[in-house]
Image (tube, rainbow, N blue to C red):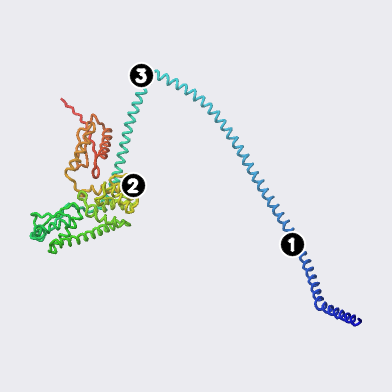
Protein backbone atom coordinates (compact mmCIF):
# COMPACT_ATOMS: atom_id res chain seq x y z
CA UNK A 1 0.00 0.00 0.00
CA UNK A 2 2.77 2.29 0.91
CA UNK A 3 4.46 1.45 -2.34
CA UNK A 4 1.40 2.41 -4.22
CA UNK A 5 1.16 5.72 -2.45
CA UNK A 6 4.84 6.35 -2.98
CA UNK A 7 4.45 5.57 -6.73
CA UNK A 8 1.48 7.84 -6.98
CA UNK A 9 3.27 10.65 -5.20
CA UNK A 10 6.27 10.20 -7.40
CA UNK A 11 4.08 10.33 -10.50
CA UNK A 12 2.43 13.48 -9.30
CA UNK A 13 5.79 15.12 -8.65
CA UNK A 14 7.00 14.20 -12.09
CA UNK A 15 3.78 15.52 -13.69
CA UNK A 16 4.04 18.78 -11.79
CA UNK A 17 7.65 19.17 -12.84
CA UNK A 18 6.69 18.56 -16.46
CA UNK A 19 3.87 21.06 -16.19
CA UNK A 20 6.16 23.70 -14.75
CA UNK A 21 8.71 23.02 -17.46
CA UNK A 22 6.02 23.25 -20.15
CA UNK A 23 4.69 26.56 -18.76
CA UNK A 24 8.17 28.07 -18.80
CA UNK A 25 8.87 26.97 -22.35
CA UNK A 26 5.52 27.61 -23.99
CA UNK A 27 3.12 29.71 -21.98
CA UNK A 28 5.49 32.20 -20.36
CA UNK A 29 6.91 33.52 -23.71
CA UNK A 30 3.40 33.82 -25.13
CA UNK A 31 2.21 35.74 -22.12
CA UNK A 32 5.14 38.11 -22.42
CA UNK A 33 4.44 38.60 -26.13
CA UNK A 34 0.77 39.20 -25.45
CA UNK A 35 1.56 41.82 -22.82
CA UNK A 36 3.94 43.56 -25.25
CA UNK A 37 1.28 43.47 -27.96
CA UNK A 38 -1.29 44.87 -25.54
CA UNK A 39 1.06 47.67 -24.62
CA UNK A 40 1.68 48.42 -28.30
CA UNK A 41 -2.05 48.48 -29.08
CA UNK A 42 -2.66 50.81 -26.16
CA UNK A 43 0.04 53.12 -27.48
CA UNK A 44 -1.46 53.01 -31.05
CA UNK A 45 -4.89 53.70 -29.53
CA UNK A 46 -3.57 56.73 -27.71
CA UNK A 47 -1.90 57.99 -30.90
CA UNK A 48 -5.12 57.39 -32.89
CA UNK A 49 -7.07 59.32 -30.27
CA UNK A 50 -4.58 62.14 -30.53
CA UNK A 51 -4.93 62.17 -34.40
CA UNK A 52 -8.70 62.11 -34.08
CA UNK A 53 -8.57 65.09 -31.74
CA UNK A 54 -6.27 66.88 -34.20
CA UNK A 55 -8.58 66.12 -37.15
CA UNK A 56 -11.59 67.28 -35.17
CA UNK A 57 -9.89 70.54 -34.40
CA UNK A 58 -8.83 70.96 -38.04
CA UNK A 59 -12.37 70.18 -39.29
CA UNK A 60 -13.82 72.67 -36.85
CA UNK A 61 -11.40 75.31 -38.09
CA UNK A 62 -12.23 74.58 -41.75
CA UNK A 63 -15.96 74.67 -41.02
CA UNK A 64 -15.55 78.00 -39.28
CA UNK A 65 -13.56 79.37 -42.24
CA UNK A 66 -16.19 78.09 -44.77
CA UNK A 67 -18.99 79.58 -42.72
CA UNK A 68 -17.14 82.88 -42.62
CA UNK A 69 -16.57 82.77 -46.40
CA UNK A 70 -20.23 81.93 -47.09
CA UNK A 71 -21.36 84.69 -44.78
CA UNK A 72 -19.04 87.17 -46.52
CA UNK A 73 -20.28 86.05 -49.99
CA UNK A 74 -23.90 86.37 -48.89
CA UNK A 75 -23.27 89.83 -47.54
CA UNK A 76 -21.54 90.86 -50.78
CA UNK A 77 -24.45 89.54 -52.88
CA UNK A 78 -26.91 91.32 -50.61
CA UNK A 79 -25.01 94.57 -51.03
CA UNK A 80 -25.00 94.15 -54.84
CA UNK A 81 -28.72 93.33 -54.89
CA UNK A 82 -29.48 96.32 -52.70
CA UNK A 83 -27.43 98.50 -55.06
CA UNK A 84 -29.25 97.06 -58.11
CA UNK A 85 -32.62 97.60 -56.44
CA UNK A 86 -31.64 101.19 -55.72
CA UNK A 87 -30.63 101.73 -59.38
CA UNK A 88 -33.95 100.21 -60.58
CA UNK A 89 -35.86 102.39 -58.13
CA UNK A 90 -34.03 105.47 -59.43
CA UNK A 91 -34.81 104.51 -63.07
CA UNK A 92 -38.45 103.89 -62.25
CA UNK A 93 -38.66 107.20 -60.51
CA UNK A 94 -37.08 108.89 -63.53
CA UNK A 95 -39.50 107.12 -65.90
CA UNK A 96 -42.45 108.11 -63.75
CA UNK A 97 -41.35 111.71 -63.93
CA UNK A 98 -40.91 111.47 -67.71
CA UNK A 99 -44.34 109.83 -68.11
CA UNK A 100 -45.93 112.50 -65.99
CA UNK A 101 -44.38 115.20 -68.18
CA UNK A 102 -45.51 113.41 -71.35
CA UNK A 103 -48.97 112.89 -69.97
CA UNK A 104 -49.20 116.58 -69.26
CA UNK A 105 -48.05 117.28 -72.86
CA UNK A 106 -50.64 114.85 -74.27
CA UNK A 107 -53.40 116.37 -72.23
CA UNK A 108 -52.36 119.81 -73.43
CA UNK A 109 -52.35 118.60 -77.08
CA UNK A 110 -55.73 116.96 -76.60
CA UNK A 111 -57.17 120.23 -75.41
CA UNK A 112 -55.61 121.95 -78.44
CA UNK A 113 -56.98 119.29 -80.80
CA UNK A 114 -60.41 119.55 -79.27
CA UNK A 115 -60.35 123.29 -79.87
CA UNK A 116 -59.16 122.77 -83.48
CA UNK A 117 -61.81 120.11 -84.07
CA UNK A 118 -64.47 122.47 -82.89
CA UNK A 119 -63.04 125.13 -85.22
CA UNK A 120 -62.87 122.64 -88.12
CA UNK A 121 -66.44 121.51 -87.47
CA UNK A 122 -67.57 125.09 -87.66
CA UNK A 123 -65.66 125.64 -90.91
CA UNK A 124 -67.02 122.36 -92.35
CA UNK A 125 -70.57 123.45 -91.66
CA UNK A 126 -69.87 126.77 -93.35
CA UNK A 127 -68.34 125.00 -96.39
CA UNK A 128 -71.25 122.57 -96.61
CA UNK A 129 -73.70 125.43 -96.53
CA UNK A 130 -71.69 127.25 -99.22
CA UNK A 131 -71.53 124.08 -101.40
CA UNK A 132 -75.26 123.58 -100.99
CA UNK A 133 -75.92 127.15 -102.14
CA UNK A 134 -73.54 126.64 -105.10
CA UNK A 135 -75.21 123.35 -106.01
CA UNK A 136 -78.63 124.95 -105.94
CA UNK A 137 -77.34 127.84 -108.05
CA UNK A 138 -75.70 125.44 -110.58
CA UNK A 139 -78.85 123.35 -110.73
CA UNK A 140 -80.91 126.50 -111.36
CA UNK A 141 -78.55 127.73 -114.08
CA UNK A 142 -78.00 124.36 -115.90
CA UNK A 143 -81.47 123.00 -115.50
CA UNK A 144 -80.03 119.53 -114.54
CA UNK A 145 -80.72 117.43 -111.49
CA UNK A 146 -77.74 116.38 -109.32
CA UNK A 147 -78.03 112.78 -110.59
CA UNK A 148 -77.98 113.90 -114.25
CA UNK A 149 -74.95 116.12 -113.62
CA UNK A 150 -73.20 113.28 -111.80
CA UNK A 151 -73.76 110.90 -114.73
CA UNK A 152 -72.40 113.44 -117.21
CA UNK A 153 -69.34 114.02 -115.04
CA UNK A 154 -68.71 110.28 -114.58
CA UNK A 155 -68.97 109.63 -118.32
CA UNK A 156 -66.48 112.41 -118.96
CA UNK A 157 -64.08 111.06 -116.34
CA UNK A 158 -64.49 107.50 -117.66
CA UNK A 159 -63.76 108.53 -121.24
CA UNK A 160 -60.72 110.51 -120.15
CA UNK A 161 -59.50 107.58 -118.05
CA UNK A 162 -59.97 105.15 -120.95
CA UNK A 163 -57.96 107.37 -123.27
CA UNK A 164 -55.20 107.83 -120.71
CA UNK A 165 -55.14 104.07 -120.00
CA UNK A 166 -54.99 103.26 -123.71
CA UNK A 167 -52.13 105.71 -124.22
CA UNK A 168 -50.31 104.31 -121.20
CA UNK A 169 -50.83 100.73 -122.41
CA UNK A 170 -49.62 101.70 -125.87
CA UNK A 171 -46.48 103.33 -124.47
CA UNK A 172 -45.75 100.37 -122.16
CA UNK A 173 -46.37 97.80 -124.88
CA UNK A 174 -44.24 99.74 -127.34
CA UNK A 175 -41.38 100.01 -124.87
CA UNK A 176 -41.68 96.34 -123.87
CA UNK A 177 -41.86 95.30 -127.51
CA UNK A 178 -38.77 97.28 -128.44
CA UNK A 179 -36.79 95.97 -125.48
CA UNK A 180 -38.06 92.41 -125.96
CA UNK A 181 -37.34 92.44 -129.67
CA UNK A 182 -33.86 93.84 -129.07
CA UNK A 183 -33.00 91.28 -126.41
CA UNK A 184 -34.58 88.38 -128.29
CA UNK A 185 -32.83 89.45 -131.49
CA UNK A 186 -29.48 89.49 -129.70
CA UNK A 187 -30.01 86.06 -128.17
CA UNK A 188 -31.32 84.44 -131.37
CA UNK A 189 -28.70 86.00 -133.62
CA UNK A 190 -25.96 84.90 -131.26
CA UNK A 191 -27.44 81.39 -131.11
CA UNK A 192 -27.82 81.15 -134.90
CA UNK A 193 -24.34 82.53 -135.52
CA UNK A 194 -22.75 80.01 -133.18
CA UNK A 195 -24.86 77.04 -134.31
CA UNK A 196 -25.25 77.56 -138.07
CA UNK A 197 -25.15 74.23 -139.94
CA UNK A 198 -25.63 73.29 -143.56
CA UNK A 199 -28.93 71.70 -144.52
CA UNK A 200 -29.39 69.45 -147.52
CA UNK A 201 -32.89 68.68 -148.66
CA UNK A 202 -33.62 64.96 -148.44
CA UNK A 203 -35.78 63.06 -150.90
CA UNK A 204 -37.47 59.67 -151.04
CA UNK A 205 -35.37 58.38 -153.94
CA UNK A 206 -31.69 57.52 -154.40
CA UNK A 207 -29.84 57.52 -157.70
CA UNK A 208 -27.10 54.91 -158.21
CA UNK A 209 -24.65 55.64 -161.06
CA UNK A 210 -23.72 52.83 -163.47
CA UNK A 211 -20.43 52.37 -165.31
CA UNK A 212 -22.37 51.78 -168.55
CA UNK A 213 -25.84 51.02 -169.81
CA UNK A 214 -25.00 47.34 -170.25
CA UNK A 215 -25.08 47.01 -166.48
CA UNK A 216 -28.86 47.61 -166.54
CA UNK A 217 -29.39 44.29 -168.29
CA UNK A 218 -27.20 42.47 -165.79
CA UNK A 219 -29.14 44.07 -162.94
CA UNK A 220 -32.45 42.93 -164.46
CA UNK A 221 -31.14 39.44 -165.09
CA UNK A 222 -32.66 36.62 -167.09
CA UNK A 223 -36.44 37.03 -167.15
CA UNK A 224 -36.05 39.70 -164.41
CA UNK A 225 -34.99 37.28 -161.66
CA UNK A 226 -32.16 39.52 -160.40
CA UNK A 227 -34.32 42.61 -160.03
CA UNK A 228 -37.08 40.57 -158.35
CA UNK A 229 -34.61 39.04 -155.90
CA UNK A 230 -33.16 42.47 -155.17
CA UNK A 231 -36.57 44.06 -154.52
CA UNK A 232 -37.68 41.13 -152.33
CA UNK A 233 -34.46 41.18 -150.28
CA UNK A 234 -34.43 44.95 -149.74
CA UNK A 235 -38.10 45.98 -149.91
CA UNK A 236 -37.14 48.80 -152.29
CA UNK A 237 -38.46 49.55 -155.76
CA UNK A 238 -35.69 49.46 -158.38
CA UNK A 239 -36.62 51.80 -161.26
CA UNK A 240 -34.72 51.28 -164.49
CA UNK A 241 -35.73 53.79 -167.18
CA UNK A 242 -34.12 55.68 -170.01
CA UNK A 243 -31.89 57.71 -167.70
CA UNK A 244 -28.39 57.14 -169.06
CA UNK A 245 -25.97 55.27 -166.81
CA UNK A 246 -28.16 55.47 -163.69
CA UNK A 247 -30.90 53.58 -161.89
CA UNK A 248 -33.28 54.89 -159.24
CA UNK A 249 -34.11 53.35 -155.86
CA UNK A 250 -37.51 54.42 -154.53
CA UNK A 251 -38.74 53.77 -150.99
CA UNK A 252 -40.29 55.80 -148.20
CA UNK A 253 -38.16 54.00 -145.58
CA UNK A 254 -34.74 55.74 -145.70
CA UNK A 255 -32.97 52.90 -143.89
CA UNK A 256 -34.12 50.28 -146.38
CA UNK A 257 -33.29 52.63 -149.22
CA UNK A 258 -29.77 53.12 -147.82
CA UNK A 259 -29.32 49.33 -147.46
CA UNK A 260 -30.41 48.91 -151.10
CA UNK A 261 -28.07 51.67 -152.30
CA UNK A 262 -25.03 50.18 -150.54
CA UNK A 263 -25.91 46.67 -151.74
CA UNK A 264 -26.43 47.73 -155.35
CA UNK A 265 -23.22 49.78 -155.35
CA UNK A 266 -21.28 46.78 -154.05
CA UNK A 267 -22.91 44.44 -156.59
CA UNK A 268 -22.01 46.75 -159.45
CA UNK A 269 -18.43 47.06 -158.20
CA UNK A 270 -18.15 43.25 -157.76
CA UNK A 271 -19.77 42.39 -161.09
CA UNK A 272 -21.28 39.13 -159.86
CA UNK A 273 -25.04 39.65 -159.86
CA UNK A 274 -27.28 36.66 -159.19
CA UNK A 275 -29.95 35.87 -156.55
CA UNK A 276 -27.62 34.09 -154.07
CA UNK A 277 -25.03 36.85 -154.32
CA UNK A 278 -27.74 39.50 -153.96
CA UNK A 279 -28.93 38.03 -150.64
CA UNK A 280 -25.37 37.83 -149.31
CA UNK A 281 -24.54 41.44 -150.30
CA UNK A 282 -27.83 42.77 -148.93
CA UNK A 283 -27.14 41.12 -145.55
CA UNK A 284 -23.67 42.70 -145.43
CA UNK A 285 -25.20 46.05 -146.39
CA UNK A 286 -27.63 45.75 -143.46
CA UNK A 287 -24.72 45.17 -141.10
CA UNK A 288 -22.94 48.17 -142.60
CA UNK A 289 -26.00 50.40 -142.11
CA UNK A 290 -26.37 49.13 -138.55
CA UNK A 291 -22.77 50.09 -137.85
CA UNK A 292 -23.31 53.53 -139.41
CA UNK A 293 -26.40 54.02 -137.26
CA UNK A 294 -24.35 53.41 -134.11
CA UNK A 295 -21.59 55.70 -135.33
CA UNK A 296 -24.08 58.46 -136.17
CA UNK A 297 -25.69 58.21 -132.73
CA UNK A 298 -22.35 58.26 -130.91
CA UNK A 299 -21.13 61.16 -133.05
CA UNK A 300 -24.26 63.19 -132.26
CA UNK A 301 -23.86 62.50 -128.53
CA UNK A 302 -20.18 63.44 -128.65
CA UNK A 303 -20.83 66.59 -130.68
CA UNK A 304 -23.50 67.91 -128.31
CA UNK A 305 -21.76 66.81 -125.11
CA UNK A 306 -24.78 64.89 -123.83
CA UNK A 307 -23.64 61.95 -121.68
CA UNK A 308 -25.23 59.07 -119.83
CA UNK A 309 -27.76 58.07 -122.51
CA UNK A 310 -29.05 54.51 -122.62
CA UNK A 311 -27.62 52.47 -125.55
CA UNK A 312 -31.13 52.12 -127.01
CA UNK A 313 -31.48 55.91 -127.16
CA UNK A 314 -28.07 56.25 -128.85
CA UNK A 315 -29.18 53.73 -131.50
CA UNK A 316 -32.47 55.57 -132.03
CA UNK A 317 -30.51 58.81 -132.47
CA UNK A 318 -28.48 57.08 -135.17
CA UNK A 319 -31.67 55.99 -136.92
CA UNK A 320 -32.72 59.64 -137.05
CA UNK A 321 -29.91 60.16 -139.58
CA UNK A 322 -32.09 58.32 -142.09
CA UNK A 323 -35.32 60.17 -141.23
CA UNK A 324 -36.49 63.45 -142.75
CA UNK A 325 -39.14 66.04 -141.89
CA UNK A 326 -40.21 68.31 -144.74
CA UNK A 327 -36.93 67.40 -146.40
CA UNK A 328 -34.86 68.30 -143.30
CA UNK A 329 -32.63 65.59 -141.84
CA UNK A 330 -34.02 64.83 -138.38
CA UNK A 331 -30.66 64.03 -136.75
CA UNK A 332 -29.01 67.20 -138.09
CA UNK A 333 -32.09 69.14 -136.97
CA UNK A 334 -31.88 67.61 -133.46
CA UNK A 335 -28.18 68.38 -133.12
CA UNK A 336 -28.83 71.95 -134.22
CA UNK A 337 -31.70 72.27 -131.74
CA UNK A 338 -29.44 70.97 -128.96
CA UNK A 339 -26.80 73.61 -129.76
CA UNK A 340 -29.44 76.35 -129.95
CA UNK A 341 -30.91 75.23 -126.61
CA UNK A 342 -27.49 75.37 -124.98
CA UNK A 343 -26.79 78.89 -126.23
CA UNK A 344 -30.24 80.27 -125.34
CA UNK A 345 -30.24 78.58 -121.91
CA UNK A 346 -26.82 80.03 -121.09
CA UNK A 347 -28.02 83.51 -122.08
CA UNK A 348 -31.17 83.19 -119.93
CA UNK A 349 -29.48 81.54 -116.95
CA UNK A 350 -31.40 78.26 -117.32
CA UNK A 351 -30.13 74.68 -116.93
CA UNK A 352 -27.86 74.29 -119.98
CA UNK A 353 -27.30 70.52 -119.60
CA UNK A 354 -31.02 69.80 -119.27
CA UNK A 355 -31.91 72.04 -122.23
CA UNK A 356 -29.28 70.45 -124.52
CA UNK A 357 -30.33 66.93 -123.49
CA UNK A 358 -34.00 67.63 -124.16
CA UNK A 359 -33.17 69.42 -127.44
CA UNK A 360 -31.18 66.45 -128.73
CA UNK A 361 -33.92 63.94 -127.79
CA UNK A 362 -37.02 66.00 -128.65
CA UNK A 363 -37.76 64.18 -131.96
CA UNK A 364 -36.83 60.67 -130.80
CA UNK A 365 -40.48 59.67 -131.18
CA UNK A 366 -40.19 59.98 -134.98
CA UNK A 367 -38.14 56.76 -135.13
CA UNK A 368 -40.54 54.71 -132.97
CA UNK A 369 -41.66 51.42 -134.49
CA UNK A 370 -44.93 51.06 -136.37
CA UNK A 371 -46.68 49.50 -133.37
CA UNK A 372 -46.59 52.81 -131.49
CA UNK A 373 -49.39 55.24 -132.27
CA UNK A 374 -49.92 58.89 -131.46
CA UNK A 375 -48.12 62.22 -131.99
CA UNK A 376 -44.35 61.92 -132.05
CA UNK A 377 -44.04 64.37 -129.13
CA UNK A 378 -46.08 62.09 -126.84
CA UNK A 379 -44.14 59.06 -128.11
CA UNK A 380 -40.96 60.94 -127.20
CA UNK A 381 -42.15 61.32 -123.60
CA UNK A 382 -43.06 57.63 -123.41
CA UNK A 383 -39.70 56.50 -124.85
CA UNK A 384 -37.65 58.74 -122.56
CA UNK A 385 -39.51 57.52 -119.48
CA UNK A 386 -39.02 53.91 -120.61
CA UNK A 387 -35.25 54.32 -120.85
CA UNK A 388 -34.75 56.04 -117.51
CA UNK A 389 -34.67 59.73 -118.38
CA UNK A 390 -35.89 62.15 -115.71
CA UNK A 391 -39.36 63.66 -115.76
CA UNK A 392 -37.88 67.13 -116.37
CA UNK A 393 -36.10 65.93 -119.52
CA UNK A 394 -39.17 64.02 -120.74
CA UNK A 395 -41.45 67.04 -120.32
CA UNK A 396 -38.97 69.48 -121.87
CA UNK A 397 -38.46 67.17 -124.88
CA UNK A 398 -42.14 66.29 -125.36
CA UNK A 399 -43.66 69.75 -124.91
CA UNK A 400 -42.04 71.35 -127.98
CA UNK A 401 -45.35 71.18 -129.91
CA UNK A 402 -47.40 71.92 -126.74
CA UNK A 403 -49.12 68.51 -126.85
CA UNK A 404 -48.43 68.63 -123.08
CA UNK A 405 -48.11 71.69 -120.88
CA UNK A 406 -44.49 72.92 -120.54
CA UNK A 407 -43.40 72.52 -116.93
CA UNK A 408 -40.13 74.49 -117.02
CA UNK A 409 -38.30 77.28 -118.81
CA UNK A 410 -36.13 74.60 -120.47
CA UNK A 411 -39.25 73.17 -122.15
CA UNK A 412 -40.03 76.59 -123.64
CA UNK A 413 -36.41 76.94 -124.77
CA UNK A 414 -36.66 73.61 -126.63
CA UNK A 415 -39.87 74.76 -128.35
CA UNK A 416 -38.21 78.04 -129.38
CA UNK A 417 -35.08 76.30 -130.67
CA UNK A 418 -37.19 73.76 -132.60
CA UNK A 419 -39.17 76.54 -134.30
CA UNK A 420 -35.99 78.48 -134.99
CA UNK A 421 -34.26 75.51 -136.62
CA UNK A 422 -37.31 74.66 -138.70
CA UNK A 423 -38.00 78.25 -139.79
CA UNK A 424 -34.54 79.05 -141.10
CA UNK A 425 -34.57 79.77 -144.84
CA UNK A 426 -33.73 76.62 -146.76
CA UNK A 427 -34.11 74.31 -143.79
CA UNK A 428 -37.37 72.75 -144.96
CA UNK A 429 -39.39 72.35 -148.07
CA UNK A 430 -43.02 73.39 -148.12
CA UNK A 431 -45.64 72.11 -150.51
CA UNK A 432 -47.16 74.75 -152.76
CA UNK A 433 -50.66 73.71 -151.70
CA UNK A 434 -49.82 74.15 -147.98
CA UNK A 435 -48.29 77.55 -148.68
CA UNK A 436 -51.37 78.75 -150.59
CA UNK A 437 -53.70 77.47 -147.86
CA UNK A 438 -51.70 79.21 -145.17
CA UNK A 439 -51.78 82.54 -147.03
CA UNK A 440 -55.52 82.22 -147.68
CA UNK A 441 -56.19 81.39 -144.03
CA UNK A 442 -54.26 84.48 -142.91
CA UNK A 443 -56.30 86.75 -145.16
CA UNK A 444 -59.59 85.12 -144.16
CA UNK A 445 -58.86 85.55 -140.43
CA UNK A 446 -57.98 89.21 -140.95
CA UNK A 447 -61.07 89.90 -143.12
CA UNK A 448 -63.37 88.38 -140.47
CA UNK A 449 -62.94 91.36 -138.11
CA UNK A 450 -65.27 94.39 -138.41
CA UNK A 451 -63.73 97.56 -139.73
CA UNK A 452 -61.22 95.77 -141.98
CA UNK A 453 -61.44 96.99 -145.56
CA UNK A 454 -58.82 94.71 -147.12
CA UNK A 455 -56.16 92.26 -145.88
CA UNK A 456 -52.98 91.19 -147.69
CA UNK A 457 -50.61 88.34 -146.73
CA UNK A 458 -47.07 89.34 -147.72
CA UNK A 459 -43.49 88.12 -147.25
CA UNK A 460 -44.38 84.50 -147.97
CA UNK A 461 -47.06 84.50 -145.30
CA UNK A 462 -44.85 85.88 -142.53
CA UNK A 463 -46.73 89.20 -142.38
CA UNK A 464 -50.36 90.20 -142.82
CA UNK A 465 -51.23 93.83 -143.53
CA UNK A 466 -54.71 95.20 -142.91
CA UNK A 467 -56.20 98.38 -144.32
CA UNK A 468 -59.00 99.51 -142.00
CA UNK A 469 -61.81 101.99 -142.45
CA UNK A 470 -60.73 105.21 -140.68
CA UNK A 471 -64.26 106.25 -139.80
CA UNK A 472 -64.87 102.98 -137.92
CA UNK A 473 -61.43 102.27 -136.40
CA UNK A 474 -59.46 104.94 -134.53
CA UNK A 475 -55.81 104.75 -133.51
CA UNK A 476 -56.47 103.05 -130.19
CA UNK A 477 -58.89 100.61 -131.76
CA UNK A 478 -56.24 99.77 -134.38
CA UNK A 479 -53.87 98.65 -131.62
CA UNK A 480 -56.56 96.47 -130.05
CA UNK A 481 -57.46 95.02 -133.46
CA UNK A 482 -53.84 94.03 -134.14
CA UNK A 483 -53.64 92.23 -130.79
CA UNK A 484 -56.91 90.34 -131.34
CA UNK A 485 -55.94 89.24 -134.86
CA UNK A 486 -52.54 88.04 -133.67
CA UNK A 487 -54.20 86.10 -130.84
CA UNK A 488 -56.68 84.47 -133.23
CA UNK A 489 -53.87 83.47 -135.62
CA UNK A 490 -52.03 81.83 -132.72
CA UNK A 491 -55.14 79.88 -131.74
CA UNK A 492 -56.30 78.70 -135.17
CA UNK A 493 -53.17 78.25 -137.31
CA UNK A 494 -49.94 76.26 -137.30
CA UNK A 495 -46.95 78.01 -138.82
CA UNK A 496 -43.17 78.14 -138.47
CA UNK A 497 -41.52 81.17 -136.91
CA UNK A 498 -43.72 84.21 -136.30
CA UNK A 499 -46.28 86.24 -138.23
CA UNK A 500 -46.32 90.03 -138.06
CA UNK A 501 -49.70 91.81 -137.99
CA UNK A 502 -49.69 95.39 -139.33
CA UNK A 503 -52.82 97.58 -139.17
CA UNK A 504 -52.80 100.58 -141.57
CA UNK A 505 -55.21 103.45 -140.92
CA UNK A 506 -55.20 106.42 -143.25
CA UNK A 507 -57.41 109.50 -143.15
CA UNK A 508 -57.50 111.81 -146.18
CA UNK A 509 -59.14 115.19 -146.30
CA UNK A 510 -59.83 116.42 -149.89
CA UNK A 511 -61.20 119.80 -150.84
CA UNK A 512 -61.21 121.75 -154.11
CA UNK A 513 -60.59 125.48 -154.50
CA UNK A 514 -62.93 126.94 -157.11
| Alpha carbon distance from label 3 to label 1 | 118 Å
Q: Quadrant of the N terminus?
A: bottom right
Q: Look at the numbered disc 1 and give the secondary structure of its residue.
A: helix
Picture coordinates of residue 498, whole percent (x, y) = 25, 43
Question: Is residue 304 left or right of 101 when viewed as pictured?
Answer: left
Picture coordinates of residue 110, whole percent (x, y) = 55, 29
Picture coordinates of residue 126, whole percent (x, y) = 46, 21
| Alpha carbon distance from label 2 to label 1 | 88 Å
Of the numbered discs 2 and 3, the one sitting upstream in the chain is 3
Q: Residue at image x 35%, y 23%?
A: 151
Query: Which of pointers 2 and 3 indicates the residue nearer the eye?
Result: 2
Q: Residue furthest bottom?
A: 3
Q: Quadrant of the C terminus?
A: top left
Picture coordinates of residue 354, whole percent (x, y) = 33, 52
Query: Which of pointers 3 and 1 indicates the residue nearer the eye?
Result: 1
Q: Is residue 291 above or below residue 362?
A: below
Q: Residue at image x 90%, y 80%?
A: 5
Residue 474 shows in the view: yes
Give whichever of 376, 359 is nearer the camera: 376
Residue 186 shows in the view: no
Question: Is residue 389 left or right of 233 when viewed as pictured?
Answer: right
Residue on which the image places disc 1: 55
Residue on which the image places disc 2: 409
Residue on which the image places disc 3: 144
Of the numbered discs 2 and 1, the one sitting upstream in the chain is 1
Instruction: Count the labels in the image.
Output: 3
Give whichever of 203, 120 is nearer the camera: 203
| Alpha carbon distance from label 2 to label 3 | 60 Å
| Quarter assignment of residue 132 | top left
Q: Residues within 10 Å of mark 2 (few under 14, many from 20)?
A: some
Q: Residues within 10 Å of mark 3 (few under 14, many from 20)?
A: few
Q: Look at the numbered disc 3 and give the secondary structure of its residue.
A: loop
Amino acid sequence: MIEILVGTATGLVVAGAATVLLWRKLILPKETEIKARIAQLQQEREEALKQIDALKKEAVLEAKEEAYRIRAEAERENREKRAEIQRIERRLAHKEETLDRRLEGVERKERQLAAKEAEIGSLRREVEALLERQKQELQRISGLTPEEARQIFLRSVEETARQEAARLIRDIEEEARREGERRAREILIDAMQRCAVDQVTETTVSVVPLPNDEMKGRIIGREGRNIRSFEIATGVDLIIDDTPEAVVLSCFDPIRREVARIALTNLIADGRIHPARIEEVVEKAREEVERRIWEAGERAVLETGVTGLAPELVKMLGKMRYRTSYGQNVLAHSVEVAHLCGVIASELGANVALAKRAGLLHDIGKVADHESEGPHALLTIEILRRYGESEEVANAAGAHHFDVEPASIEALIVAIADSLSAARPGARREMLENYVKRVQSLEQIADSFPGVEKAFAVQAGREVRLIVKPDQVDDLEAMRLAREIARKIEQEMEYPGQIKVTVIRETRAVEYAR
